[in-house]
Image (cartoon, rainbow, N blue to C red):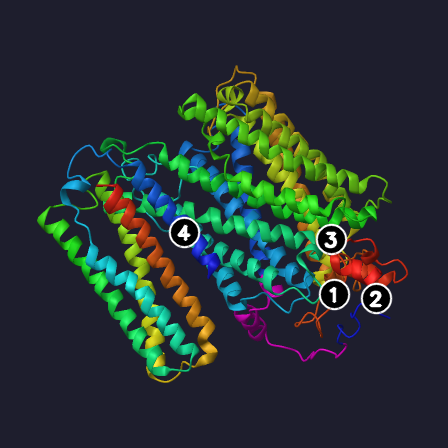
Amino acid sequence: MWCLITAESAMFLIFVVAYIFYLGKSLNGPTPKEILNLPIFDTVCLLSSSITVRLSVNGLLKHSQMAFIGWLTATVLLGITFLLGTGKEWNDLIFKHNFTIHTNLFGTTFYSLVGLHATHVAIGLLMLSVVLMLGLFGKVDQDQTRRFHSLSMYWHFVDGVWVVVFIVVYVIGR
Amino acid sequence: MADSIHLSGIIDLTPEDKHPRLWLEVMHEWIVTTDHKKIGLMYIAASMMFLVIGGIEVLLMRIQLAVPESTFLAPEQYNQLFTLHGTTMIFFVAMTIEFGFANYMVPLMIGARDMAFPRLNAFSFWIYLFGASLLYYSILGGKGVYGGSGIPDVGWFAYAPLTEKAFSAGNGSDYWALAIFISGIGSIGTALNIIVTTICMRCKGMKLSRMPLFAWLMLVTSVMVVAAIPPLSAAQIMLLIDRYLGGHFFDAQAGGSAVIWAHFFWIFGHPEVYILVMPAFGFMNEIVPVFSRKVIFGYPAMVAASVGIAFISFTVWAHHMFTVGMEPVANTVFVISTMTIAIPTGIKIFNWLATIWGGKIRFTVPMLFCIAFLFQFTLAGLTGIMLGVAPFDWQLHNSAFVVAHFHYVIVGGILFALFGAFYYWFPKMTGRMMSRTLGKWHFWLFVLGFHLTFDFMHIPGLLGMPREVYTYEPGHHWEIWNMIVTIGAFVQAVAIIIFVYNLVRSQFTGKLAGNDPWDAWTLEWATTSPPPNYNFASEPMVRSRRPLWDLKHPEDPDWKYEFDAENEMATK
């Protein structure tokens, strides 16, 4: 999993570099300051989902199916909320502000970077949901702890990337 | 006795089941296999096929360039050929043939049963094959007949903005981007496998400081792959976003940078060429000591130098971009980093020389190829240093001199080491020796052809001939050199035909090899040839870097001379 995280980090780094390089270079169109709002609620959701997934792993370690399933459900729900929040943000940007990937350099780099992250969140959610389903059918026991822990590391990575994206796009960029 | 190595019992003599099998059974076994040895062989076989295809592409180009103003090929066809040639040779031949050898040898060398993730291994192979097929599907599919070019014609580095929709209307750039993106997933998978296998699955007693240098070099290469391929994937995603979603990453008219693709590509591209050469260093590290009958000189320095090269290789990328107009300070930084990378590389060359010095040299075919590597790779490195001096590069960027330099490394260095590896490990993989006579014919013809082509290619470069041009006017004094280069290419082709014939024929008529035909020292030579499915019947236990030497020479074992804490305790 560490290898995968290294590889994905290298890829995200290039998109972040492109984003930073193109800050202020758009020839036209809205600037970050004008149309971006801080996604505080989404961020809180995603970051707490890291905590809940950790609690879920602990639950599995301690033989507590209830804790495992319960916290995993919370993780999935928080992740879905994050994605819905991003979807709402994009809906506003596209239809209210006419701001698309095509609009200007900011648009291209913003949607690419945030979109790439959202894709990784979606994939992570898919995997977590699969584990949740398997857990509900009673197929996940202590022997699977290492695998679930690997998946939780992926989820922490996705959260880590969001911290970087948040700082670069919403804090520095504006 | 306390110093005995537990290699007895690792060879299981139970006879294999030899009932006649249907073709379909055999094919099925190969398609679903997760055995690292079979997957390694499939990588090698597929890479050899693409080597031949890439070779045909280059022969066509050389025919076109042999005389000025030739009309053998149309300009568009020439562009497609050099794009396919470069892309195929780098991504679908060199990287994958080295992964093939790594797949086969690394688990055996470290006394493991298989790779850490056998199914990921199989997946990585098949997705490489799919990606490579996708590139060649562009010949049939795409808008090749009706619209813009279906076959990519943008060079193996596919610079944007040329690859933007506005300038490359057909699907060529898409095939290029997707084919490499998809096989890149396979490369990362294999690299991941090698890293985990070498770190977690070494046999008892094999600390990292006792691991064979080929395994070390594959570990370093794999770390580089994990770090260097994703930037290329990122750039390709950006390109596809530009082409299909209206993005502006490389769109100068929207304020985008025309140079940023070059930066992202070469951030991948430079480490990539070191990814190509490190396994070749690994082959040298295994073959040269065995045929000098001496331990490799300076094992720790070799490891440190390899790691050093890996790190520095990520800092030199813009030496491919000296002519794009960066600030002088930026140019200078990259000149200095390029010079720096020569230091660990030079250490390796000196260590190989020191290994051979004073040894009892056996001029077997693998050793011939390795000695040629030493001369040729050194020369290639020197022309690289020349190009690393920015003002010199300003004269020679994009000339035939650059083409000569990098082919000197890839063909004169990497391919020679690969040939050495073929002759060295063929007996282990098939149980038979390759023909020594044909091997020598192959070697000398290839040396002749290689030098005819690539020595003389430097000259038109110095005289001003650009690269990637489909023809040239007479009167520049380039004609005679181009003709010699073309003749050399055909000589090399003959040598390769001899090699392939040797490769195929020896499987049926080669001398039986036995377990250890070369009197070598690493664990793979302790198994039968070919090894059984499970490699080792029980886990080996090693006490030094040369476990088979210890077995064969119990009166003079290596662990008495290798100084580490564990051996110190034992000898007291």
Residue annotated with mark 1: B529
Q: CA distance from mark 2 to mark 1?
A: 27 Å
Residue B475 falls left or right of residue A136: right
- Closest to the camera, between mark 4 and mark 1, is 4
Q: Secondary structure at mark 2?
A: loop
Q: Secondary structure at mark 3?
A: helix
Q: CA distance from mark 3 to mark 2?
A: 30 Å
Q: CA distance from mark 3 to mark 1?
A: 12 Å
CA neighbours of label 4 inside 10 A, class few (<14), some (14 to 19), many (20+):
many
Residue A110 in percent (x, y) is at 25, 46
Pick the front one: B478 or B227: B227
Residue B49 in percent (x, y) is at 56, 52
- Closest to the camera, between mark 2 and mark 1, is 2
Residue annotated with mark 2: B3
Q: Give the chain of mark 2.
A: B
Q: Are marks 3 and 2 on the same chain?
A: yes
Residue annotated with mark 4: A9
Residue B569 in percent (x, y) is at 79, 61
Q: Of callouts 3 and 1, which one flags the residue occurring earlier in the amino acid sequence?
A: 3
Q: Quadrant of the C terminus of chain B?
A: bottom right
Q: To which quarter of the image does residue A14 belong?
A: top left
The residue range painted magenta reads B13-39
- Closest to the camera, between mark 3 and mark 4, is 4
Q: Is residue A103 visible?
A: no
Q: CA distance from mark 4 to mark 1?
A: 42 Å
